Image (cartoon, rainbow, N blue to C red):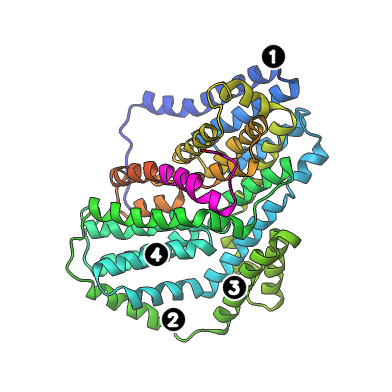
Amino acid sequence: MKVEIDTRSIWVLLAIKALRPLFFILVAIGFWAVTTMEPAEGLTPSGQRAIGIFLLCLVLWVSNMVPVAITSLLAIVLVPLLGIVPKSETYALFGNEAVFFILGAFILAGAVMHSGLSNRIALVMMRRYGHSPRRLLVSIFLLAAVLSFFMSEHAVAAMLLPIALDISKALGLRPGRSNYGKLLFFALAWGSVIGGVATFLGGARVPLALGILEETTDSTIGFIEYTVAVFPLVVVLLIVGYLVLTRIFPVDIPDVAKAMGVIEKRAKGLGKLRYSEYAVGTVMLLTIVAWSTLGHTIGLSTVSLIAVAVLFVFRLVRWKNIEEYVNWGIILMYGGAIILGSALDKSGAARWIVESAISDWATTPWAVFAVFSFLAIALTESMSNAAVIAVLVPVSIGMSDNLGLDPALLTYAIAVPAGLAFMLPMSTPANAIAVSSGYVTVKDMVKGGFIMFVTAWIVFNLVAAFYWPLIGLGGLGR
């Protein structure tokens, strides 16, 4: 067993140990100061306390000193404890439809992965279309994107990782040095990120944003309506992403014959399509159809939970097989974020923040839209996209009231860019998975990611300006 000895000075080690409790002491003092000071003009005492909780959560989310789920639990406790929203109403908010939609989506995705269907689709597609370096790269890129239409982008990246590693080893690619090695793992990560914004299923951030929107305004956005609005952005970013990657890291291998041998062996090892794969795939397909056609009438969460019940009634999955795919921390985090958003809205804090900090310099609908979309895409590089939603959506709803804007438009402006993280490994698990492979460095990711960061923001705003009016999503003017 290898033993590592820390040679740093004892004073350095003691200082590091002391920083964590010092951080929490300073945070606690700051929280107490904000919540007990005299409220600013136009701000109610409950609004002052809501802002205190908001700032506390913001600091903990950004610093990542405690898990994001624990920060959300702290918000759930503090909102009724400080008298901002009654406790019965606070805990009822945890039963928001968005939370159950997210839970259902996790279970459905877990069933697809456990059955082996997703792995089979991946291998079949690569075996059929990946007979040259560029075609194999495009296959992985598009496969990651398309699978992320229907399941968590994080799960897609994790599922494709071992396949990409096997391909890299078969081709003898050198970690950190091979351009093609970098391309494979960038394709895995960026494909998942771009595809993850195409529907409600790629990540829980959109259902969370809709939960806050519905809780505060009683309006919502439909499953198909959202996808139709966002799909052109996804197509453009996939094209731009491929061009950016192949320009920065030119393909440096002549063929992929050895990789195809690995893919062929893996695919044959799966055997024939099993009943469980066929049945789970059918349930998933019918669920997507139901979300598209019945989501508005009976609710997205209702469809999700009916599908989950069908899986267990017909014994297509067992709970012990699904538990590992359900991220309970995410469930807690999103419930807390919805409660925090509701507290900011009901206490009047969101409106006060808008009037005092943003409305003076963002006075036109387009300026507001552009500012919120930029904040969302910038903040998601350094903090959880759920936290970005929880921070910005309630404030944007207050802004929409002031300008007479449809709050759904600003919900789009935050929920979509919040999923487009390209620059840093800590911004999304898909990026972290790519860096963890050893084939991609943080420097590589920042170099390509900055171009995509700027491109994604510009393209999103252009789509909103010129495409959305054609499908009836006007209201921003030009």
Q: Earlier in the sequence, mark 2 or mark 1?
A: 1
Q: In 3D space, how far apart are the residues under numbered discs 4 and 2 (Cα atoms)?
A: 22 Å
State the extent of the magenta-drawn residues as a range: 456-477
Q: Earlier in the sequence, mark 4 or mark 1?
A: 1
Residue 41 is labelled as 1
Q: Earlier in the sequence, mark 1 or mark 3?
A: 1
Q: Which amino acid is tagged 4?
A: Leu
Q: Which amino acid is tagged 3?
A: Leu
Q: Which amino acid is tagged 1?
A: Glu
> Could you tell me residue 17's position as x and y percent?
46, 29
Q: Residue 56, located in which quarter of the rendered image? A: top right
Residue 285 is labelled as 3
Q: Are the two marked residues, 4 and 1, in contact with CB atoms closer than 8 angstroms?
A: no
Q: Are the two marked residues, 1 and 3, in contact with CB atoms closer than 8 angstroms?
A: no
> Could you tell me residue 166's position as x and y percent?
32, 68
Residue drawn at point x = 39 percent, y = 43 percent? 453
Q: For the residues carrying marks 4 and 2, which lies nearer the camera in this image?
A: 4
Q: Earlier in the sequence, mark 3 or mark 4?
A: 4
Badge 4 crowding class, 10 Å Cα cut-off, few under 14, some 14 to 19, many 20 or more, is many
Q: Give the residue at the far bottom of this rendering.
A: 272
Residue underneath mark 2? 270
Residue 142 is labelled as 4
